[in-house]
Image (cartoon, rainbow, N blue to C red):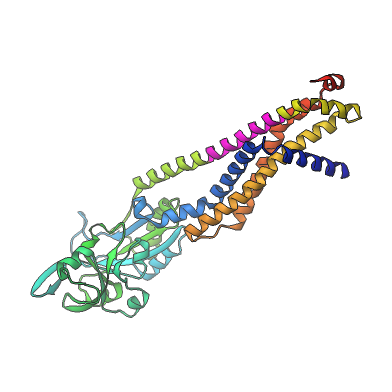
Amino acid sequence: MTKLFDILRVSSRQVLRQRRRYFGVILSIALGTAGLIAVSTMSRDVKKNLNQDLELLGGCTLVKAYFEEFLPDRHQSSRIQRFDPKTVEAVRNSPGVALVSLSGVKRGAASSVWRNRTESFTLFGVDEYFWEVNSFYAASGELFGKPDVQDRQRVCVLGAELAHRIFGENNAVGSVISIDHDIYRVTGILGGLGVGDRTQFAFIPLTSGLDRITGMSSDRLYIRCASWDDVERVAESVSALVSAHQSADRLRIVFAGEQLRRVKRIVWWVEWFIYLSVVATLILGGFGIWNGMMSAVQARTREIGLKKAMGAEDGDILAQFLTEALCLSLGSAAIGIGFGRTIMEVIGKLLSSPPREDLFIRFMIAGLLFALALGIGAGFYPALRASRMEVVKAIRYE
């Protein structure tokens, strides 16, 4: 134990003395280790954060299930399906599903009369989850929530174009509007990257719509998946879940399959590029260790000869130089772990998601093992060469 402690003390002191020579090696391994830990640990949270913005990804994590109103092989007067509460609950509890919104749209246009002028528009009945599922927000005012849906309040949210058509330049928020002869209070104007033609729609609580609007039915489900890896599996399972609780006649499942494949392909290439860059940085650090140790062996040839003349065996010389390489690689990895932890904390703050400690510990150990292998692999040949030097030639070396 004493001998091992002495070797570690001498080797670490030697690395500290030569820290300027090894600066590039230390920096390379530290950055590579930091990148490995940060990327591996936070990639899941980064992917989750990307998933939350559906429209930036082309809506690729959104699955839509609805009952089609008219089919070529169905009589138009046949009864239109609606989603049973048990079906919605089963879909909501399905693996890979993050959030589910039940909604409906009035068949035919709704109308509003304002200053003797009638405006026609599409009317949606939505629940409290609709906004979050579709990444919508209030451009002004506020979006109605769970209490309004539960209490069947007569409130509504308008698309920006519809609000302008009805109210002109006047502020629509807080005003009252007639929708199919009922009075509703405007709570907000719809905003969001994926609003699209919904700027011409009006939205009321689904419960109020089912009670008051003729021709409205809860026939649409918007399903937000936990990640893009779950989309295809969720889309395939929805039909089976619906069939298990009610008739699946007229059911249609829609998701952005092409956009999904494109996004996954891009992310896959980006991830591999990052990992290859990290590995290349670490390997570059390994070459730096090899080159630095070869230079050290050459510079300390007489020292090696003197030690052998004083009784040091080949194994002692091998252990000393190999330990120096390990001190260099593991010390650099320890610095990299500190950098990686700092990067993780910064990313966690930006994403409002603290890093997972179990993943950090797992990849910290992986980083140390990689550094250990790097130190042994890069330092073994120089150490072996030093141990096999002949005493006389080493002492006479100039």
Residue 95 position within the rendered picture, expressed as x and y whole percent measured from the top left: 47, 59
Locate residue 238, reporting x and y percent. 39, 58
Residue for point 56% across, 51% down:
41
The span shown in magenta is: 275-294
Query: Is residue 52 shown above or below 117?
Result: above
Would residue 351 be found to the left or right of residue 41 on screen?
left
- Residue ranking furthest to the right: 311
Q: Nearer the viewer, residue 227 or 397?
A: 397
Residue 364 in the image: above or below residue 82:
above
Vertical side of 18 occupied by 361: above or below: below
The one nearer the camera, 128 or 13, is 13
In the image, what residue occupies the spot 15% across and 68% down? Answer: 168
Rendered view: 185 above or below 265: below
Q: In which quadrant of the rendered image does the N terminus lie?
A: top right
Magenta stretch holds residue 291:
yes
Of residues 221 and 191, which is closer to you in this image?
191
